[in-house]
Structure formats: C-alpha cells, structure tokens
Amino acid sequence: KAGYDMWPGPYGEWGSRKYLIASCNQSLKRMGLDYVDIFYSHRPDPNTPLEETMIALDQIVRSGKALYAGISSYDPEQSQKAITILKELGTPCLVHQPSYSMFNRWVEDGLLDVLAQNGVGSVVFSPLFQGLLTNKYLSGIPEGSRASKADSYLQSSDITPEKIDKVKRLNEIAESRGQKMAQMALSWVLRDKRVTSVIIGASKVSQIEDAVGILDKMEFTSEELHTIEGILKA
C-alpha cells in the first residue's frame, strides 16, 4: 500500500501517479518480489484528481505488479467514486481496508453500505484499537507497551479513565462468553457480515492462536449486543 511518506520533497506521499507507481516499485524491490496480491491507495489525496490515483492503480495491475487493486481509509463518497472509476477502467476495486473497532466505528456511517452495494470486500485493521481493547491496560500503562512509546499511534492520553472503565465492563462480558477481551473485540467487528475479514497485527504466536480461537465463539446473543452497545455509548 502507498499513501504516506516515502521520501522528502514533491511526490513523496499521497496519491499522485508518480508517487504510487514509484512506491510500488520500491516496495517490490525491498521485498524481493515480482508482484503483490493487492496494492492499496492507502489514503485519498486532496490535491490529486481521484481519476489520476485510480489510473495509477489500474496501471499497476495491468503491468503485473499487483493482482488486484484496493483502497484504504476512503470515506463513503470517495469510495463510491473510486469504485466507479476503477470499474470503468476494467480493474475492479477488490477490497477496502478501513480501521474499525469498538472505539472507532466510522465505517458504520455509510461506508459498509457502499461496499456491500458494490460487492467490494472489507478487511478491517486496528480492531483492538492499538491494544486498548485487550487486558493490557486495565491496571495502568505497562513499560514497553505501545502507549509508553512517544512515536506510537496510541498515546497515553488516549487511555482515559472512561475508556478503561468501559474496557473493564466489556471484559466482564468477554469472560462470561469464555473469551479474552481481545477475542471478543475481534468477534465483535466480524459480527457484521459486510466485514470480510480482520487484520490482527500479531507480534506473537500466542496472539495468532488467540485470534484463531474465536472461530467457535463468533455469534452474539441479542442481549450481549444490547449490553455492549450500552457500554460503548455511555
């Protein structure tokens, strides 16, 4: 995927044709690959026509450097436009990669509807809100954790007493379901059939094992969903 800083100066980020193609070429060289399965435009560019960005994705696919094209973090309107342009070019948009979690629900405000209407998959990232939706921060900020690092997306200021209280209450529901907090958070984002899959971002084998362990506890009762919704909206 491409969209953020690759090099200083003009065309070093965002979504220009020059940037996307150069970024793809550099990524393939670093990975020692001839092609990737999916190449994403990782964020819409406010200063580049959307047509230019989508034409670049089309070229990347047609050149054999990616099998499919995708977008990430585009809002509902931007997504619909991108999907339409790619369809007209003959390189359909395969998937959208948005952030989504119990604490970050923006995709519910139209994006999932757009994806479902167009038959585009949705593979969500950051389902654990950078680790906050786990048991990790229930007793403070552990040394070495994401929140303890200055360059982390999750800052210590994000870990408010209100959020910790919510996680504690959510954890009680998880325990009653026979799950860890992280497992329930994964099951929750997958409760909506418009969500195709989820990126777990595992750094340990145990985290992969925990993620796979949700397969027999994917369903929620209406009472559980109602209780969870009450906690999240409190």
Image (cartoon, helix red, strand yellow):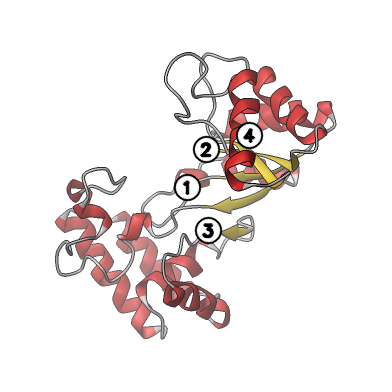
State the residue position of label 3: 199
State left or right for residue 83 relative to residue 186: right
Contact check, label 1 and label 2, Cβ < 8 Å: yes
**Chain-order first, disc 1 or disc 3:** 1
Residue 12: x percent and y percent?
A: 49, 21
The kind of residue tagged 3 is Ile
User: Does 25 appear above or below 182?
Assistant: above
- Residue tagged 4: 24
Q: Is residue 212 above or below residue 199?
A: below
3 to the left or right of 197: left
Chain-order first, disc 2 or disc 3: 2
Residue bearing the label numbered 1:
99
Would you name the residue on which mark 2 appears? 73
Residue sitting nearer the eye, 189 or 224? 189
Q: Are marks 2 and 4 in contact (CB under 8 Å)?
A: no
Element type at mark 2? loop
User: Amino acid under label 1?
Assistant: Ser
- Mark 2 and mark 4 lie on one chain; the one further toward the N terminus is 4
